[in-house]
Amino acid sequence: MLALSHINLTFGRFIRASLNWLNTPAVILIYHRVTDLKTDPQMLAVKPENFSKQIEHLKKNYNVLKGEDFFRILKNREQFPPKSILVTFDDGYADNFYQALPILESYNTQALFYISTSQLNTPREFWWDDLERIFLSNTPVPPKLKFQHNSDSHLFNTSTVEERTLTYRKVHPLIKIQDYQIRENTLQQLYSWAGVAAEGRKTHRILTENELLKLSQSSSALIGAHTHNHVPLSTLTYERQIEEMKTSKNILENITGRKISHFSYPFGTTVDYNRQSITAAKELHFSTACANFYWQVHSWNDPLQIPRILVRDWDLNEFQQKMKEFFKY
């Protein structure tokens, strides 16, 4: 098995190197947050100091393109300039405006911000942050949790830190695939069980409409849609997918006063969206749609299934090495 894995890896690298020889690769980076968190189980946050060094490195050593320029090259099936980069953000955390934007502006660099709209102007957190707040904080909780998922009932022990961490890891994927209304009912039950308010932490809040408007007015920001309720589109009917995508598009256009032409699939792995999602994006006249699976971008890529590479809270040395890997194979 080990030998077979090595052969597959070697063959994969050969294929990728061959493709890169035929056609200059570009890379799209995904960020989510720029802030310093004590607890970050999903590893979504990059410290401001690290983000600043990462952007400075990209500016000095890579060809950091604006969103419209990047997608124009892709649409026209042109060769990308060597070492082309597009910076993107998913979700719409408030720290995108307060922490990420000033750093981008200081380096005269643009990022594309994909915004999920249901939590705008609310004190609520995203559901995955709610789970972290409930299970992984120091707030005392009852020793057991009975959790209903579809027709199945789950019983979890939550007396110790280890048990709560394990419960968090098991509940997270169950809630991810729940319908939005069922997910909301589940969260309300968890709030009640844990004795915490639905109102979240200020450190984890989403943008307000006014912050989003100001973000959109910066030359260092381009706004895209990311559904209304941040659900895996593949779990929804075609009609519900259209509704999710159209609602976020309309809200963002009303707030910013600008046409929203770009979209990213929530979660974005190849199981989180499907052919209907691509058809829906096309029907709603999105010119591009980004996913979240590891690969480079070439001129032949489907503009409605564009791969991206996730960035973690890497210091400068590790980021430099990662960037070399991203362009190598």
Image (cartoon, rainbow, N blue to C red):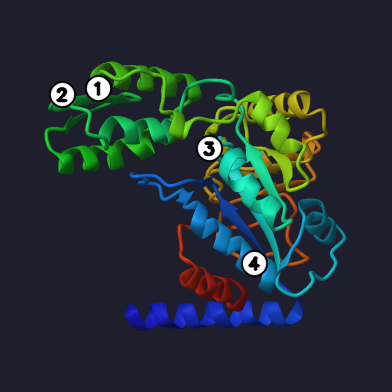
Say which element carries label 3: loop
* Numbered circle sitting on residue 320: none
| Residue 271 placement, left or right of 249 | left
x then y, percent, for residue 238? 64, 30
Looking at marks 4 and 2 on the same chain, the residue that comes earlier in the sequence is marked by 4
Find the distance from the CA under tag 1 to the CA under tag 3.
26 Å
Q: Nearer the viewer, mark 1 or mark 4?
A: 4
Kind of residue sitting beneath label 4 = Leu
Cβ atoms at labels 4 and 3 below 8 Å apart: no
* Numbered circle sitting on residue 232: 3
What is the crowding at mark 1: few (fewer than 14 residues within 10 Å), some, or many (at least 20)?
A: some
Looking at marks 4 and 3 on the same chain, the residue that comes earlier in the sequence is marked by 4
Kind of residue sitting beneath label 2 = Pro
Residue 87, quarter of the rendered image: bottom right
Say which element carries label 1: helix
Query: Which residue appears at 51% of the width and 75% of the height?
Result: 321
Name the residue carrying label 2.
142
Cβ atoms at labels 4 and 2 below 8 Å apart: no
Kind of residue sitting beneath label 1 = Ala
Q: Nearer the viewer, mark 4 or mark 3?
A: 4
x then y, percent, for residue 225? 68, 36
Find the distance from the CA under tag 2 to the CA under tag 1.
7 Å
Cβ atoms at labels 2 and 1 below 8 Å apart: yes
Find the distance from the CA under tag 4 to the CA under tag 2.
48 Å
Q: Quadrant of the C terminus?
A: bottom right
Name the residue carrying label 1.
194
Name the residue carrying label 4.
58
Q: Nearer the viewer, residue 283 or 291?
A: 291
Query: Which residue appears at 58% of the width and 53% of the height?
Result: 30
